[in-house]
Amino acid sequence: MIMINEIAKNIEKHLKALREFTSTCGNGVTRFPFTKEAKMAVQYLEDEMKKIGLKTRIDESGAIIGRLEGKEKRTIIIGSHYDSVKYGGEFDGIAGIVCGLEVARLLKEKDFSSKYSVEIIGTNDEEGARFKSGFFSSKAMLGQLKVSDLEAFKDSDNISIYDAMKDYGLNPDRIYEAKRNLEDIKAFLEIHIEQGPVLEKHGKDIGIVDTIVGMQRYMVNIQGRADHAGTTPMDMRIDAVEVAAKVISNIGDIARTYKNAVATVGSINVFPNEINTIAQNVSFSIDIRSTKQEAVNSIYQKIKEWIENITSKYNSKYSITSTLSINPVDMNEGLKDKIEKSCIERKFLYEHINSGAGHDSLPMAEAVDTAMIFVPSKAGRSHSKEEFTSYEHLAKAALVALDAIVNI
Ligand code: HGY
Ligand code: MN
Ligand code: MN
């Protein structure tokens, strides 16, 4: 028990320090990629990695990497993301990195001469909250990013990832150098809060993830015509808000016709957004997820048909841009067994669970053996300042990850 308290105290110290690096003080954590808050969090993590005795570097995607050399070059990575959504919580992503710091500290203190090297990675822009895509560092590590992607994705101030990177002090033209040799990655482990109510409801300490949902994200643009709100008769206007509202109001019901699928319109922008001008255009996001790829595909098809139907009825034009498309993925059986073995030996209560949230493990699992260790979220809340997970649960996850590494 002493071990758990000591680890929990360290985790609490780190997370309470890191939550200060936010651009919305007092209103949750907002730590967008390539911002000064991100830089401060990376600096904190790098300092702590150095104190533990890790060799540190920052890769071309902005990920912070702390490495413990093993006998072999092949590396076990413990990773999660240091960026957040707007007005987010203090645990999403960052808690997994901090648990990794504790695993590295314990390996070092035990002078564990691991066969494999171990890396703790704080990834950048997993959320996609600023540029509407996501999984930035993991995609860079997998060699899936092109410079043209960096120029294409823009934030709400029309700043591209490319320009934001230069501003931040990174060289976007060298994004390719973040690519890892996948033969060198023995395993990717991610500790993450569940962000849902299941583990807490079932009184469990640990969730062993079986499958992570596949996700498709789109930006839809509905074109209307800007006209005077007072003088334009109802049958002579093309009101982009009215058309978008009719489209959006049916998207949830389309998803409800499928078991375990979700579709969300989270972001809507109106132009010119004036109370006495009929809207010229409306752009909104769609985020579709399911553990079944065919469900995601057919929900998208049904939404597309619906958009087609409504816009032609109100003779407005539309465009749809795909900003993310990633298939559901199963976690590695061998790693899950090692996690399960540790829970049984340590008498931690656990259950198998699927992840409705996307994580760096989602793209990573396509390429390397990957597993996720979930911990309970208080009242299932996340992506809001109410997000909370007990430090003891995080400490238990760190011990389970430590056992899995020793076992590997
Ligand atoms: O959107 C998600 O599921 C995650 O929080 N990136
Ligand atoms: Mn998140
Ligand atoms: Mn996350």
Image (cartoon, rainbow, N blue to C red):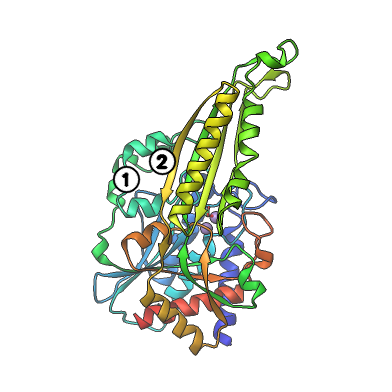
Q: Is residue 121 visible?
A: no
- Left/right placement of residue 324 relative to residue 346 reads left
Q: Name the residue at the right extreme.
A: 230
Give the amino acid type for the residue marked by disc 1 in the picture: Ile
Q: Which of marks 2 and 1 is in front?
A: 1
Please provide percent x and percent y for residue 167. Answer: 43, 37
For disc 2, the marked residue is 165
Residue sitting at x 64%, y 66%: 197
Count every numbered label the image shows and give the total.
2
- Mark 1 lies on a secondary structure that is helix
- Mark 2 lies on a secondary structure that is helix
Please provide percent x and percent y for residue 264. Answer: 59, 46
Up the image or down, 236 lies above or below 394; here it is above
Check residue 66 in the rendering and tell me which mark sits there, or answer none: none
- Label 2 neighbourhood size at 10 Å, few (<14), some (14-19), many (20+)? many
Please provide percent x and percent y for residue 4. Answer: 56, 82
Residue sitting at x 31%, y 52%: 178
Q: In which quarter of the image is the C terminus?
A: bottom left
Please provide percent x and percent y for residue 236. Answer: 66, 13
For disc 1, the marked residue is 175
Of the two numbered discs 2 and 1 on the same chain, state the one appearing first in sequence: 2
Q: Are marks 2 and 1 in contact (CB under 8 Å)?
A: yes
Q: How far apart are marks 2 and 1 (CA)?
A: 10 Å
- Residue 182 sits in quarter: bottom left
Residue sitting at x 50%, y 87%: 344
Residue sitting at x 52%, y 42%: 302
Up the image or down, 315 lies above or below 219; here it is above
